[in-house]
Image (cartoon, helix red, strand yellow):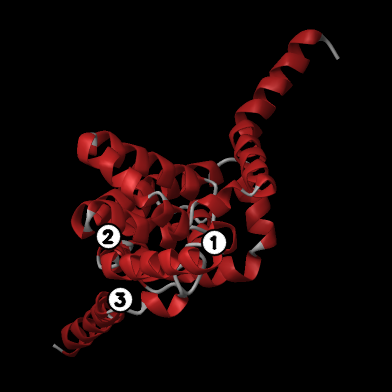
Amino acid sequence: MSTAPRTALIRTAVRRYGAPALIVAIMALVLLQGWHHQLTLESVVVQRDRFHDFIAQHTALAVLAYVAIYVAAATLSLPCGVAMSVAGGLLFGWLVGTVAAVVGATLGATMVFLIARTAVGNAFCERAGPWLARLSQGFQKDALLYMLFLRLVPAFPFWFVNLAPAVLGVPLRTFVLGTFLGIIPATLAFASTGAGLDSVIMAAKSEYAACVALQGLEKCRLTIHASSFFTRELAQALILIGVVAVIPVVIKNVKKWRKRDAAAK
């Protein structure tokens, strides 16, 4: 094979497989090194005072850094979305934390969507045939409404809902709008939970200080028990998610009733 055709093949391969291969390589490196374990709420709590000092002095930069980290985590499909959303509320308050998390998650999901439109999409289609067949019917009826439903009701993993619409031909605008609007309720819920964790953090710090006083620094670890997360804010957030999750079903039934009334007339 001459040099020119070989170079053309290499360029085509890099164009089609370069971005997905880079994402997979970075994801493998992060998982093998265990860096994703650092994106936990406990690590944020440990550095909370330092973060708040930095945020007070450089608020805009801190928010941009948080969004960038969220975009990277979502693009790599790392399982830390809940912790990131809670941390956003803890660091920036429920409003700014919600907006920053929604923007970061939407941008990261869009990156995965665009990557799935390359050759990776074909391989994904072959492996997820039955699931895609079920989703295809929903997208054919009403793509935006179904996109909202998938985001509001976590019947499928977040990463799967990023990939499937791309290979099923859902328009980019519909995907972005459905993702942005659909993740707001859950993100608001978790960010609100994070904003209400001050009392939980103070209790954890008091417990840690008492442990250090009795057993020494080496035998103690700052932790937050799972039961501590069930606060009033979390209960309200879960109710909000449940109410919002019913909205797509209500809209769908209203459309059916309108069609029946129109046909009857």
Q: Position of residue 31 (x, y in %)?
A: 65, 49
Res. 8 in view: yes
SS class of the residue under badge 2? helix
Amino acid, disc 2 = Leu
Along the line of sight, the residue nearer the viewer: 2 or 49:
49
Residue identified by numbered label 1: 216
Mark nearest the camera among 1 and 3 is 1
Per the model, the C-alpha gap separating discs 2 and 1 is 48 Å
Find residue 234 and name its label: 3
Q: Quadrant of the rendered structure where residue 56 is?
A: top left
Measure the C-alpha gap from mark 1 to mark 3: 34 Å
Q: Earlier in the sequence, mark 1 or mark 3?
A: 1
Amino acid on which disc 1 is placed: Gly
Q: Which residue is farthest bottom?
A: 264
Q: Position of residue 196 (x, y in %)?
A: 25, 68
- Report the mark closest to the observer, 3 or 2: 3
Residue 185 horizontal/vertical position (percent): 28, 67
* Residue that numbered label 2 is attached to: 181
Image quadrant in which you'd find residue 54: top left
Q: Residue furthest front?
A: 214
Q: Nearer the viewer, residue 227 or 260?
A: 227
**Distance from the alpha carbon under mark 3 to that under mark 2:** 20 Å
Mark 3 / mark 2, whichever is N-terminal: 2
